[in-house]
Image: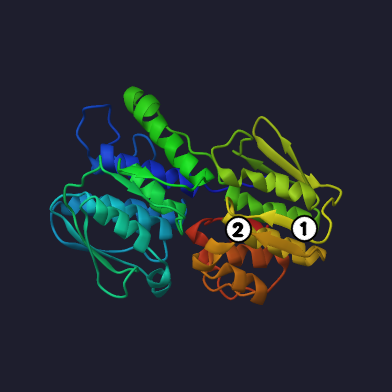
């Protein structure tokens, strides 16, 4: 079966941020969000997280210096990227808020880093969490600011995207993606006004790897590359241990059942790929393999507490939990949340 994966949210959202900050015209041209689409069109078929960030950025541009309220739902990426973006939008005051779960996802490290370079940000509720009132002003982006041991590497990426001089002791594929996309935007696409083709999402591929491991089907996933920017491409290496062979083709990858290699317990450090944890954990459970997972600290502050959600087989309105549970054959009480990252998943899964 041939499956069309969604685009990579990680790449798309970083690209949207750069378009908003610098414009998508050649160097020296004015920024005009109303003309977005020359480089990366945004459509209703894209993940909700991409649409939320796009609509939020567009609303800021359309309102100019008027005070506005932005509701970013349960989109953690939008919360972090917009906090940095809005802090440097001079003379605009924005209240940034989301669903109740977002009010429990920490953002204090990013706020403190931004304050160090002059940002005017107030907490409207509990210290360290949304909602925020952000008054845009000129930031001292030349001043060095550090974020060590970040709870989310998106704090670092948010500062990088606005051009702040941020330093960190953290290494992460997500920071590498940010650095690479900034470089691509600045040198290749911005100068030549080229089209930008976004990779398909390796994180979403994890659920089809889970499907092959548990149900023995063969699946083709076009648009995935061995030399991808995405750190979650390691899903191919992980599932090679769990009975799935990956064959790279001119179009993408082909997944097929293979001999199970992993022994119990199977140990893996998820610090660089936390989004893969639900699919891997439930695959191991169904295969009767004890998983010894390390690097899982950030999993408790995702859309759900994913450590608990996996243990209790609960969705908790978490898109990745819903997909992983469905493939593993567990009941799911919320499938609407899946559109956050993968709008076509239910239709494809039913097929």
| Residue 302 drawn above or below residue 7 | below
Relative to 317, 226 lies left or right: right
Residue at (59%, 67%) from the top-left corner? 322
Image coordinates for residue 71, horizontal then vertical, percent: 31, 65
The reply to whether callout 2 and callout 1 are in contact (CB within 8 Å) is no
Q: Nearer the viewer, residue 266 or 45?
A: 266
Q: Residues within 10 Å of mark 1 (few under 14, many from 20)?
A: some
Task: Residue 295: give its label.
Answer: 2
> Could you say whether the residue bearing mark 1 is in a helix, strand or loop?
strand
Q: What colour scheme was applied to this rendering of the protein? A: rainbow
For residue 101, what is the image quadrant? Answer: bottom left
Task: Residue 15: give its label.
Answer: none
| Residue 138 drawn above or below residue 196 | below
Relative to 336, 27 lies left or right: left
Residue 50 seen from this side: no
> Could you say whether the residue bearing mark 2 is in a helix, strand or loop?
loop
Task: Residue 266: give its label.
Answer: 1
For residue 280, what is the image quadrant? Answer: bottom right
- Distance of label 2 from label 1 (alpha carbons): 14 Å
Residue at (60%, 47%) from the top-left corner? 232
Residue at (64%, 62%) from the top-left corner? 278
Q: Nearer the viewer, residue 47 or 286?
A: 286
Residue at (45%, 56%) from the top-left corner? 150
Q: Tell me which label, 2 or 1, sits earlier in the chain.
A: 1
Q: Nearer the viewer, residue 237 or 351?
A: 237
| Residue 136 drawn above or below residue 177 | below
Image coordinates for residue 103, horizontal then vertical, percent: 37, 71
Q: Nearer the viewer, residue 69 or 229?
A: 229
């Amino acid at each position: 079966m041939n499956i069309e994966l969604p685009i990579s949210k990680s790449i798309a959202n970083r690209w949207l941020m750069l378009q908003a900050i610098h414009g998508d015209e050649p160097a020296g041209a004015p920024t005009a969000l109303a003309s977005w689409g020359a480089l990366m069109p945004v459509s209703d078929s894209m993940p909700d997280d991409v649409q939320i960030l796009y609509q939020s950025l567009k609303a800021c541009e359309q309102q100019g210096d008027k005070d506005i309220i932005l509701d970013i739902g349960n989109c953690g990426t939008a919360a972090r990227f917009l906090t940095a973006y809005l802090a440097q939008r001079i003379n605009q005051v924005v209240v940034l808020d989301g669903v109740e779960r977002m009010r429990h996802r920490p953002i204090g490290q990013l706020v403190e880093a931004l304050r160090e370079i002059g940002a005017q940000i107030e907490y409207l509720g509990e210290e360290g969490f949304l909602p925020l009132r952000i008054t845009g002003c000129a930031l001292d982006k030349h001043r060095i600011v550090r974020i060590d041991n970040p709870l989310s590497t998106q704090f670092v990426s948010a500062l990088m995207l606005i051009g702040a001089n941020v330093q960190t002791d953290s290494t992460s594929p997500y920071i590498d993606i940010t650095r690479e996309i900034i470089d691509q935007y600045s040198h290749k696409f911005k100068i030549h006004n080229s089209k930008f083709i976004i990779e398909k999402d390796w994180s979403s591929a994890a659920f089809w790897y889970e499907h092959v491991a548990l149900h023995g089907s063969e699946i083709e996933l076009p648009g995935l590359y061995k030399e991808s920017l995405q750190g979650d491409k390691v899903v191919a290496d992980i599932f090679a241990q769990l009975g799935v062979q990956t064959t790279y083709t001119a179009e993408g990858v082909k997944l097929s059942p293979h001999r199970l290699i992993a022994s119990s317990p199977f140990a893996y450090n998820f610090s660089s790929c936390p989004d893969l944890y639900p699919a891997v954990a439930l695959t191991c459970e169904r295969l009767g393999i004890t998983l010894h997972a390390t690097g899982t600290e950030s999993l408790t502050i995702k859309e759900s507490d994913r450590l608990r959600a996996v243990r209790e087989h609960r969705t908790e309105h978490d898109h990745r939990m819903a997909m992983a549970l469905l493939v593993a054959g567990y009941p799911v009480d919320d499938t609407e949340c899946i559109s956050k990252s993968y709008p076509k998943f239910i239709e494809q899964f039913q097929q």
